[in-house]
Structures are given as structure tokens and as C-alpha cells.
Amino acid sequence: MEYEKVYMFQPANDRPAKRRRIEPQGLQTSWKQRRLAFDRDWSIPQRAIDARLHSINASTVDKVWTYLNLALKPDQPSTIRTGIILTGADGATEAGISKKIAEKFRVGKHRRILVPLSSSSGSNIKVLLKTLIQKAISPKFESSDNDLDDDDGELRTTRTKGHKLLNYDLQLLYDHVREHKKEQVIVALEDTEAFDSDLLSEFIELLGCWQDRIPFTCLLNVATSIESLQQRLSKAAIRVLDGKVFDVAPSSDEVEQVCEALFNSGTPLWIGSSLMSTALERQHDYIQSIDSFVKAVKYACMSAFYANALSVHLNISIEHEVIAADHFEALRQLDSFRTYSRRLLDNNEVKLLTTYLESDEALRALVSGRIAEGRQKLGVMIHVLKVIRLLQQKLPNTQVTPLSSLYVQALSGKLNGSPLLRSLLLTIRKVPSNIAASVLRALQLYHLDNRDLLVDMQPVLFRLDSLIDAQRETSTKPLRSEDDIHNSTLRTTVVAQKVELSKQKSALSEQDRKYTELLVSLSDCLGEFFEETLVDPADLVFHEIFVYDLKSPYREVFTPRPRHACERALATPHDYLDCDCCSSQQDGGNAEATLAATQPATAVLYQLYLESGSLINASDLWHAFQAVLGDGKEDAETMALFQRALAEMRYLGMMKSTRKRMDHVAKVMWHGL
Amino acid sequence: MPKRKLGAGSQVAESSTPKKSRVNGNQDSPAATSAVLDTPSKQRSILKGTPKKFGGIFNGEETPRSQRKVLFTTPSKPDEIEAPPESTSTLTTARNDRSARRKSARLLLEKTTFDDASEDDELAADDAIAREILNSTDSEEAEEDDFDALATINNIPIPDAPDTPSKRGRGRPRIHPKERKRSPTPPQDLPPHELYFHQNKPGAQKISSNTLPSHLLLTHEDYLVQIGAWQDSHQVERDWLQRLHARAFEQWVFELDQGFNICLYGYGSKRELVDNFLEQLCAESGKDRPKIIVVNGYTPSLTLPIILRTIASAIVPKNALSALPNQPEALLAALLSHLTSSTPAKKTHLVVHSIDAPRARLSQVQSALSRLASHPSVSILATADTLTFPLLWDSSTRQQFRWLFHDATTFAPFTAEIDVVEEVNGLLGRGGRRGMGGKDGVRYVLKSLTENARGLFRILVSEQLAAADSSSPAHDEEALSSEDEEMFEEVETPSKRARKAKPKPKRPKVRRTEVQEGVEYRTAYHKAVEDFVCSNEIAFRTLLKEFHDHQMVESRKDALGTERLVVPFRREELETLLEELV
């Protein structure tokens, strides 16, 4: 089979009785249960994220859609109506808008053709036109009705009557449009920047020429700016276009939105701070579509359920009898459980502890309770983060921190007592009453939406509210805080040739003083609130189960270093093979790779290759190779190995042939670059 | 030689012994000297010589050569040589004149042949300068060459020059100062980037010119025998690696199931591993086996239509197969829409071995695979062997693939993937394989050539196709197959037109040599002139030279001895090439 080009795989032995697989052992036995738990638990956030993604650019899509509808009745037949969609830097990675419009196309009956074109569709005008015509005429892009039967799935690039036309002749498209009474042909260019500018201009000019016969409409995805698009197009092409600009949410916005959707969804598994920050960083540093972020989150969830056997406890509905005993034994080994036991001992609750240690059932109950509690605490934490953002929005001169970065800080347990929070509280102490009023309103609203959250703060809020109301009736000037720097004057006096600085509080009314007191108590209250709710997840019992924070599979799976892996395998084969013979440790513990006759032939050749310059003499290489491997072997045998190693090196892309000198090969790759 | 000696003076007789020994040395290995003599180092030696003249003239002791001269000139004239009189005029001429060496050689020659007894100061000074110039040349061989050449021109017997230091220089081991500086072993423990620059220093490369004797390289049979007999001492460890990776099978199933696609990388063939995985996949799913299509990316004749056709035959019911379009693009679209509409309960698994192999690397294959991969009911398990495979995909393709990468280093030999003997022959440029990467290589070369060169190539291709067309009735089979191909891909309209637009008078010429392949040299030339590709035959030759260099065109002589130009590609390839050129 290995020399076939493409084939259907048939297992070697059809008998299912002969199973090569060994039945799972140990903690892996619970995989089926975990798999079920994953399916159930992941579906919730997945749905939330999907819904959010769908709604992100809904308004833009609607606008584009109405624009396209408008373009059906052209007022200036000589120009092409063009929707220019500003996608931002990641425009090329996702054809988001046009995809959504294509979805809209699928539903409903209409007489339009949507043709998505990308820069890879053709590098010259003929091929581009050919692709356009093929896509437009082929049944797949047609609007789901009638025409399928008479087309019979075949492309009709030839005409039944008249001249035979070239396959890039727009006359073909014209015939098609006339025959099927199409009202609009929408040409969507997915990556406008990637097109050669001459080609693009020529293409648009040509479409303009046919505009009087074929009702073209264009959609251009622009990642840079309108100005640069204008510079790239020829004047004639610009004259043909009649454009309108649409904006798309930037990608950082999308990430925030997805994060919010994820946190709000009541996900059973929380992603820890370090993993989250890695994923966010990657998203920020490289131009990635939002999809890759969702993928990363999903994969994190998958790895948690797959690799962490204890995640079986996340499914509360499972009876404890179903879970194998070793899963409970594993629970008792957890660090957080040990700390908890220590606490029980300190509190002289030995009896309770012994039940946990002896009874699986009791432990199961404890786990369920603690997990629920931990989840609830983390849920509250998200609300607190939102309150923080709310305050930041209302207060002057404060930047609103993105939810995702607050989340990362909060889950690392560092948000509590951070400079960010302290400065926030200090600012609250200084605000005049008009701003305080808006802060209050926001807090009240939030409280109404999430009933039990800000209960402790209610009396303070109420008193403050009434004070401000009372003041508003008497005077138009807002109440001022004592701590506000604007309300004190700095005075310099020269006493005995020394400058004395003295702060003088400007005269504050009785109400101002009261107001200041209330502000102080409000900020104290908020401080307590933050203190109480912003828990360090690492302090929660059994946090190992519901907080997943491992970077390693994420890093290896999404950002692999294949070149490094191959180079390492060849330079130090011992790292992979773990054999006794090739260990570099045996001669003096030298970590540096050493050549040994026992190493695989390709590894030996690779190490010789590393020492040479950019041109390698094949004969010398052979002699060196023979010196290492040829001991007590026939030439032909060594030669076979040598040839195989050479061929493999070439196959891996490390060598290539050169015409510079006879019997030389060119080195292509340098180790570690 | 004896004749020369006769004509020489007493001085000559004195110093003839060293010369003789040199000559003897030459006679020992005539081949070696002739090879050395051939080196056209004249120009270089003059260039190098110029600056030394100054030093040599103004203060003789600076260069070691002048010292030597002092030692071996006649003792009566040391002062003249060491401190030559003010002879600025000769100096400038010596400096400016490119043929200074030649002149000085002649001067010495005259002096020695006529054996002028009156050696006045001026002559002595000239002599010194002349010698200095001669000495300053780096290669004695070139100088000797000049000397002999002069002698033969003048048809006079060359006496052994009395004390040309060249003889002395002969015995001295020549060490270039550069060589002395360079350390024999490369510095150790350089960081990777430093090592790169060290190994790429301009001019620092010194490689031996050894050649690998052809008989050492094994033939296919010998290779297979040897490799078959060879025992790998790491078999145990390799099996262990396989088992290690096999433990992740369950994880892979899960990942594929969740809509991800897997890409395995790492050194070693991953065929066996993947096959084991597939076996397990089938065994687990029991009777309701998933559809698995395996693509061997490394096979040299893999094409996109073959892949798509096989997939189609696997997932589309038999009665609907014939209704599918033929063109890859349309076929792919039809497949995807079929998958969307029918939504099979089980995923279709696509396994691609060596997704980065040359044939699978083509952008159309990759984009088709990525579109398949992005479909929810298709999952891809691919293996990649080269070190730089992630560069295959741009960000949007990569996103469509939804890859998860796993390190699957197996250390297994690439038995199926590589044809070792062919590969090595290709690497060392020994017959067998064509240097250029076939059609793609041609495309690449044409891109970098001028418009005229492309025009000429177009002429050659279209003429060759036309010739093949007109001779096709003679070959029924060929005609049939070519028609089949035309039906298969309906893209040849421009080429057909080009062929039809051929001027009539050319026909008989082509018809005359029915069985012949390619275009007659003359025909091609006239056609090129007609099309204003070139104006004369020299330009035509120059254009052709480029094609010859890249093996895009071959020259063959037919039975009558007329030269024919052949573009060494198959018909379909020619047609696609032509289509791109037009």
C-alpha cells in the first residue's frame, strides 16, 4: 500500500476479536466518564461563545446586507457599487464578514450570485477571470433553486450556439446572467492587499466595462486603509468604483467579548492565570483570528478532562460507587486537601478528618460541596471584576482595564491589594458629588441586576444618596471631598530664611465634611468587599480539580518547534532513544554530544554535517563517516548506511545538490538557528 | 636542453644545475606541470606585483625576495641592486605599463643571450628592476610560461637565466600568510549564529577537491541487499518509542473527534505508527468502521484530481459519481457540498503521509486539503518530515487546518518515502534525475528570464506540441490518450487556438519528420526572428544557452544530422506550461 498514491484504508485483520489495545488501567479507567462530563460541560461555554461570536459583527453584516440590497437598483449604471470593509490587521485571517454574508445568501430565495475571490485565485487577469466565471457559473454558488437539473453538475464554459468563447471571456458570465435572470453578481475580494495592484486595477476596470451588461457589486476586505487602497488603484479603476466604508470590530475587542462570554457562561472549569495570559499574549502578539483563541480555550478544557483523572469529580451527578477507588486515593494526595486536613487537625476536628480519610462517600460529599463553593466564589469574583470596571468607567482620569487582564490578575491572586485597586479607592475618596452620584447610580443598577452582591454596601450607598439629593436641592455646586487636592491650597512662607510649606484646607461646609466621611466609609466598604471576594484560587480546597493551569500541552500543541525537535533527535539521539550505548554520560558526564559508532547512521552524518562549511565534499564526508562507523564492517555495508543517511538528510531538507563543484553538496541548515 | 646550454655563456653554465633539477622534476610528472601551467594567473600576478615594485626599488631589504637576490647575484654588483640610482622614469614606466613584466623578461633575455660584456650602471639598474618585477610575481609558473613563450616567439634558445630567484623559490615551501593565520580547527562552542557566520566567511572556505569514486556508490540491488542484511542495534529502543507514542492514540482519537486535526512531526518515518493508529481506530469502532482515505504525499506522481477522485469514490454513492465534475476546483466544491448536505454520522478520516513532500507541497493541494480540513465532518491526520514544514501554510490556511502538533519522533527509516539510491544520485548530480524540479522548476526559471526568453520558450513549446499533433495520426495510442486528457481537463482552449493559428507553410516541414520529437533548430530560429524574439543567431544562441543550462531544452541530432530542440516534458505538462506562457 505504501507505493499507492491514494487508497482506502483496510485494517489488516478483520476480526474484531483480536484487539491490539490493552484495556485502560489505573486512573485512565475513568476516561469514559470524563469524556461524558466533558461533552456536557463544554457545551455550555461553547454555545455562549458561539452566540457571542455570531452577534459581534451582526450590525455591520446587516448594514452591508442592506447596502447590497440597495445596490440592486443602481442609480448610476456606469459605476460599480462597492462595499469596502475595514477589517483591521487580521482581516486576511478570517473572511468573517463575507462568510456571514454568504450564510445570509444561503437562506432565502433571490437571484444573486456571490463569488468570493482571494489573491490565490489567479496571478494574472486571465486566470482570475476564469476563476470568477467558473465560480459564478458552477452550481455550488447558485442560490439553491431550480437550475441544478439542467446543469447536471457540469461546468458550461462552452456555449451552445454562436462562437466558441475563451474560458475567461466575461461574455460567458453575461450569457449565464441573462439566461438565469440574475439580478446581482457580488464579487467579494477577501484579501485586497494581497492582489497585485496592477492586476486589481485591471480587474476592476474590466468589471466596469461590463457593468452595463452584468450587474456587478464588489465587496473589498481592506486590512490597511482606504488611502492605501486608493494609491494602489489606477485612476480609471477608482472612477469606476462607487464605494461605501464599513467598520468591523477590532480583534482585541473580539477577544474581550469572547472572554466575557466564557466567564459569564458559568463554565465548570476555570482556566488559570498563567495559561490564560499565555493564550492572550499569543493572541495579541501574532495576528490570529478569534477562532484560534476559542480553540486554545477549548483545548485547555479538553486536556483538563483528558489528562486530569480527578476531573471525573466535576460531574456531580455521578454516584461515588461508580468512581474507582483509586480516584479517591488520588484526591487524598492533593496538596490543597493536605492543607485542609492540617487545618482540621489544628481545629481539633480529628473525627471529621478520619471520616474523610476512611470513607469514600464522605470524601465525595466534601468534594462536591467544595467544588460547588469554589465555583461560586470564582463566579462572584467575575462580578467583582465587572464592578471594578464599572467604577473605572465612571471615575475621571482612570483607564478601564480589559476584563481579560483583570481576570489574569485575579486568578493569580495578585489583584487583591494591587496598586490598581488602591489607586481606585483613593480616587473614590476624592470625587466631587456629581461624579459620586453617577458612581452610585451605576452601583445601584448593578446591585439590582445581581441581587445579593452589594448587600453590605447598601446603608452607605443609601446615606450618600440622600445627602447628595439634599444638597442638590440647595445649591448647584457639587459637594467636595476633603481629600481632593483642589480643595486645599499650598502656602509658602519664609520664616527665618527657611521656606515653610503648609497645606491649608479651604473652607468646607458642614455638608462637605459629612460627604467626605461618607466617601471614606464607601471606599472602606469597597475595600472590604474586594478583600473578601477576591480570593486567591490557590487557597481554595480542591482547586486542582476545577482550575486548570498547565502551560505545557498548550505550548507544544499550538506552537511546536519541529525543527528543534528534529535537530535534537539527530544531534543527541540518546535524548529520544534512551539507550545505554549512545549515552554521552558514560564518558565523563560530558553533556556535549559525542560521535559514537553506535548512534544511528543519520545522526552520525548529521553531526559531521554540523562541523562543515556551506559546501561539503561528499568524498571527505564519506571518509569521515567511514572512520566513525566503518569499524569492522565492509565498505559496501557502510556505504549503504551512508547513502541512506545522505538521502534522509536531503529528504529532511538539510542538504541540496550544488553545481558549484563536482561531488559537493550544499549545506542548507545550521543547527540551532 | 643541451642546445640551450651551448648558446649560453659561462654564467649560465655555473647556475645551470638547479634549473636542471627543476626540469627533471617537471619531467617526472608532466601532467602535473601542464595542469599548473594552464592556470591563467598572469593578471593576478601583475596586480599583486605592482605595489611590491616600490618597496623593492627604494629599499631592497624590505621584501625577502630582494634579499635573496643579493645573495645570489654576482658579488660585483650588490650595491647597485641594493641602492639603485635615481631612475624615476623607468620606475613610472614599470608601474604604468601593463606589459612591464613582459618587457623586463625581454630585457633579461637580451642581456643574457647577447652576453653583453659592458655592463654599465644604467643597464645594471634596468636589470635590477626587471628582475624585481619578475620576482614579485607570485607564481613562478606563469612567469616561466611567459619566458618560454617569449623564447619561442623569438625563436632563440633560452639559456638558463643566471640567477632568477624563481629557481630558489621552487624549493621553498610556499606558505600564504593567510593560511598561517587560520587555525586548523574551528573554534569550539560558538553560539549558533556565530557558527553560521564562521562557516560562511567569504573566502575562508577550503574544501578539498577529492571526488567520490563512482564504483563506491551502490546500485539499487546492492543497496537493497546491504540494507536488508543490516541489523539496527536500536531496534529495541525504536519499538519502545513506538509504544510510547501508541499510548497517545486515545488522546488523538479524542482530539480528532473534537474537530481538531493532527499533524505529527519529528525525525523518522511515521508510517508504521499511523498505520497502527488506524488499526486501532478500526478495531475500536467495530463493525461501523469509519471511512479512512490514505494519501501518500511522497509518491512522485501524486496529483490533486487523484486525491479528490478517491475521496469522492469513498463518500459519494456510486450512482452519483458520474455526475461529479472533473475539474479539481469544481469537484472539491461538489464534495464539500455533498458532505454538508448528507452529514454522515461518522467522520471521514483523511490521512496524509508526508504532507510536506514535493508533490503534496503544491499550493493547490494544500489549499484543497485545508478546505477539506475545515469541514466539520472531515478530520485529517497528517505527518510532516522536513524541518521547516510550518512554512507551508500562511495564517489563513493554517487556521483552516486547525492543527494540533504532536512530536512523534520514531527514528524509523524512511523506507517507503525515499528512494535512497535515486536520491543520492540526484544529490551528487550523477545522472539519473533531472536537476531541475520538472515543470515547477521551469516555471521558476522562466519567471526570472526576460520577456524575449519567455517568448522563445513559448515558441519552442508550441512548435513541439504542433509537431506532436501533426504526427499523432501515426500513433493511435498516443492520439487516444491525448484526447482522453483533453476531455479530462477542459482548460486547453488557448493552447488549442495557438496550435490552430499556426501558419500553414510550416506544416509540411513538420510532417516530413513525423516520428521526430521537438522542433528543428532552423525552424525555431526563423520563427523566433519572425516573432521579433531575437534579431540574429547569436542572440538566439544566447537565449538557448540559458535553457540548456537549466535543462529545459535538449539538443538532439536526428538521423539526417539536423539539430532538433526538444523540451523534455510530457504532453500535459507542455500544455499547462504553454497555457501559463500565453
Image: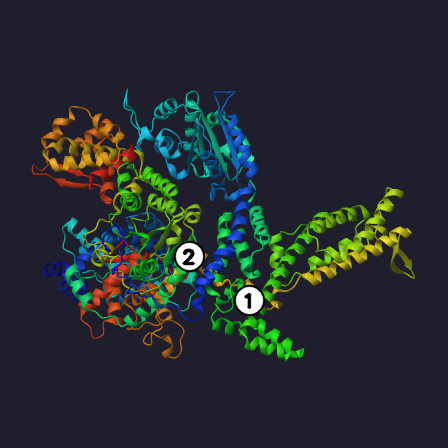
Relative to the observer, which residue lies in front, B504 or B96? B504
Mark 1 residue type:
Glu
Residue at left offset 56%, top offset 77%:
A357
Asked which colour scheme the image uses, the reply is rainbow
Mark 2 residue type:
Glu
**Quadrant in which the C terminus of chain B is drawn:** top left
For the residues tagged 2 and 1, is the chain the same? no
The picture places residue A358, in percent across and down from the top left corner, at 55, 77
Spatial separation of the CA atoms under disc 2 and disc 1: 23 Å
Residue that carries the numbered disc 2 in the rendered image:
B255
Residue that carries the numbered disc 1 in the rendered image:
A544
Relative to the observer, which residue lies in front, B354 or A305? A305
Q: Is residue A435 left or right of residue B519?
A: right
**Mark 2 chain:** B
Relative to the observer, which residue lies in front, B268 or A98? A98
Q: Is residue A279 above or below residue A125?
A: below
Q: Outermost residue toward the left?
A: B560
**Quadrant in which the N terminus of chain B is drawn:** bottom left
Please indicate, yes or no, whether residue A185 appears anywhere in the rendered image.
yes
Q: Is residue B551 above or below residue B87?
A: above
Q: Outermost residue toward the right?
A: A496
Q: Is residue A30 above or below residue A665?
A: below
Q: How many marks?
A: 2
Q: Is residue A49 left or right of residue B110?
A: right
Please indicate, yes or no, whether residue B121 appears anywhere in the rendered image.
no
The picture places residue A60, in percent across and down from the top left corner, at 55, 36
The picture places residue B446, in percent across and down from the top left corner, at 30, 39
Q: Is residue A75 left or right of residue B133?
A: right
